[in-house]
Amino acid sequence: MAEKISLRKQKKFQARQTILKAAAQQFELHGFANTSIAGIMQAARLGVGTFYNYFSSKEEVLLTLAKNLRVRVEKSIAAAKKINQSSPELLELCCVCTSKQIDENRFILPLFISASEHSDKPEQIPQSLSPGFRELFEEIILRGQECGEFRSDVPANIISEMVHSIYQTTAFSKLEISFQENIRLKVKILLDGIRAVSC
């Protein structure tokens, strides 16, 4: 009996992962607004009704994909904290990891901006479709301010907003430079501006 339950759980997990993978491919190919649940499920080779066993909307799928990106970044940050990296090093690492995840999943960033405009049910969309990178940035910045590594005359939430906005502007940049390098250089300038004078 336990074996049957385990197999059932495994099948449910696999179906959910199949839907997420298909959704990511469809969002990449057609954009969020032009991707339908039917299209996602056709790509997943599953019935449309199966979708609602796992997700309530396209927006929920998007949020899940975005949160998965955050988990990957959090793992890198946790590993860096174990070797006592400084707050500037942690923030730089966080930004580098984030830019890598976004660069490899380019459909995500524009969706944060446009998803709410194209939803049939705007009241069900969270205020931000961001995976929460801004909160990660702010946590590191607050830590740096408490340790005297970052200047404290500017609130942490203002600085984290600045860091977060780098990704939005870079997504639409026309410069002949890679997305990740563009982010890296902008973050380097920002880090120079927020370091405490003694650092």
Image (tube, grey):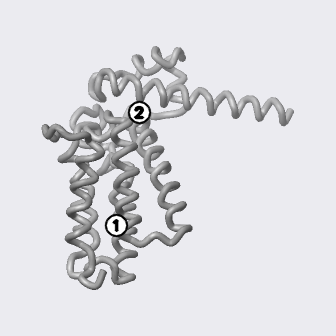
> What label sits on residue 128 in the rendered view?
none
Q: Position of residue 134 (x, y in %)?
A: 33, 58
> Would residue 122 be visible to someone looking at this image?
no
Secondary structure under tag 2 reads: loop
Residue located 54% across and 26% down the image: 18
Task: Decide if residue 39 is on the left or right side of residue 32.
Answer: right
Give residue 76's position: percent from left, percent from top: 49, 55
- The quarter of the rendered structure image containing the N terminus is top right
Residue appearing at x 32%, y 33% in the figure? 107
For mark 1, does the 10 Å Cα neighbourhood hold few (<14), some (14 to 19), or many (20 or more) residues?
Answer: many
The circle on residue 138 is: 1
Quarter of the image with the C terminus is bottom left
Left or right of 164 on screen, residue 142: right
- Say which residue label 2 marks: 57
The Cα–Cα distance between marks 2 and 1, rounded to whole angstroms, is 29 Å
Closer to the camera in the image, 109 or 44: 109
> Where is residue 119, by image quadrant?
top left
Residue 77 location in percent, x, y? 47, 60
Give the amino acid type for the residue marked by disc 1 in the picture: Glu
> Looking at the image, can residue 58 be seen?
yes
Please name the amino acid that badge 2 sits on. Ser
First in residue order: circle 2 vs circle 1: 2
Residue 59, above or below 157: above
Q: Residues within 10 Å of mark 2 (few under 14, many from 20)?
A: some
Camera-side residue: 80 or 78? 80
